[in-house]
Image (tube, rainbow, N blue to C red):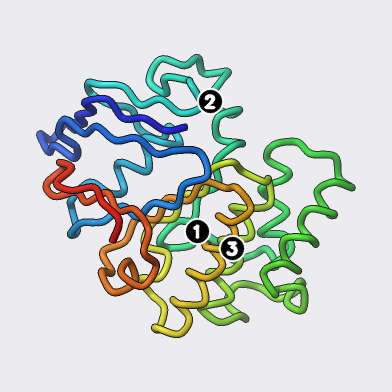
Amino acid sequence: MIQFFHVTKKYRQGAQALSDVSAHIEKGEFVFLTGPSGAGKTTFLKMVFREDVPTSGQVIVHNDDVATMSARRIPYLRRQIGVVFQDFKLLPRKTVFENVAFATQVIGLPRKEQRVRTFQVLEMLGLNHRLHNYPEQVSGGEQQRMAIARALVNRPLILLADEPTGNLDPDLAKEIMGLFKDINSHGTTVIIATHDRDLIRRMSRRVIALDHGRVVATAVA
């Protein structure tokens, strides 16, 4: 499903985000990507959905080399991947429904299918009573659910989340992780970047640990 072969990423300023990283994530797996701030977790995720490309090495997603794929192929890759950003990236002038439906508009689904999928995912995440609210009118936990709903509405094969519980209290964090666990149980490959060791221990899933851009461990927590 996802393979990194000796991946190194250097930026123009001289910083090296990843150094000779090799990793393999199976279809349907739930994996934590962990390490301190600056370890390379976000860069790793960006490689998967082709927001960034390696300086050297290969990243293979669904048998495609993300660095060499044509520009025409990139949107098709991204349609198979849902991303939950650390800062949510919600659109403040759009309602809960409009924020989630926007993802279906981007890929050009028919209007009826847009509405059906959006209603379904909002109901699944317990947001069907918030359809007409704006992001500032809902709680932090509900904003996180909005971000997850938007990532799921296009029914991705892969779900990536960057520090998805970093701004939440422990009870909400547990609730959000339960959602990810349920999503994974339906066959979606889930990769979560986090530095929360307690959270990782409670979930008991495979962990890829990064430090200064290198893989320093890979094991079940």
Give the Cα separation between the discs numbered 3 and 1.
Answer: 23 Å
The reply to whether discs 3 and 1 touch (Cβ–Cβ < 8 Å) is no
Residue 3 x %, y % = 36, 30
Quadrant hosting residue 52: top left
Tell us which disc is closer to us: 3 or 1: 3
Give the Cα separation between the discs numbered 2 and 1.
Answer: 21 Å
Type of residue at label 1? Answer: Lys
Residue 153 x %, y % = 68, 52
Residue 73 position (above or below residue 88)? above
Q: Which residue is mark 2?
A: 74
Q: Neighbour class for label 2 at 10 Å: few (<14), some, many (≥20)? A: some
The reply to whether discs 2 and 3 touch (Cβ–Cβ < 8 Å) is no
Depth check: give the residue in front, 141 or 88: 141
Tell us which disc is closer to us: 2 or 1: 2
Left or right, 68 with reference to 183:
left
Q: Residue at x 73, y 43 (%)?
A: 105
Helix, strand or loop at label 2? It is: helix
Q: Count numbered badges in the picture.
A: 3
Circle on res. 220 = none
Q: Residue at x 69, y 36 (%)?
A: 107
Depth check: give the residue in front, 1 or 164: 1
Q: Residue at x 61, y 80 (%)?
A: 138
Q: Which residue is mark 1?
A: 89
Residue 198 position (above or below residue 23)? below
Q: Neighbour class for label 3 at 10 Å: few (<14), some, many (≥20)? A: few
Q: Which residue is mark 3?
A: 182
Residue 82 x %, y % = 55, 47
Type of residue at label 2? Answer: Ile
Depth check: give the residue in front, 138 or 158: 158
The reply to whether discs 2 and 1 touch (Cβ–Cβ < 8 Å) is no
Give the Cα separation between the discs numbered 2 and 3.
Answer: 28 Å
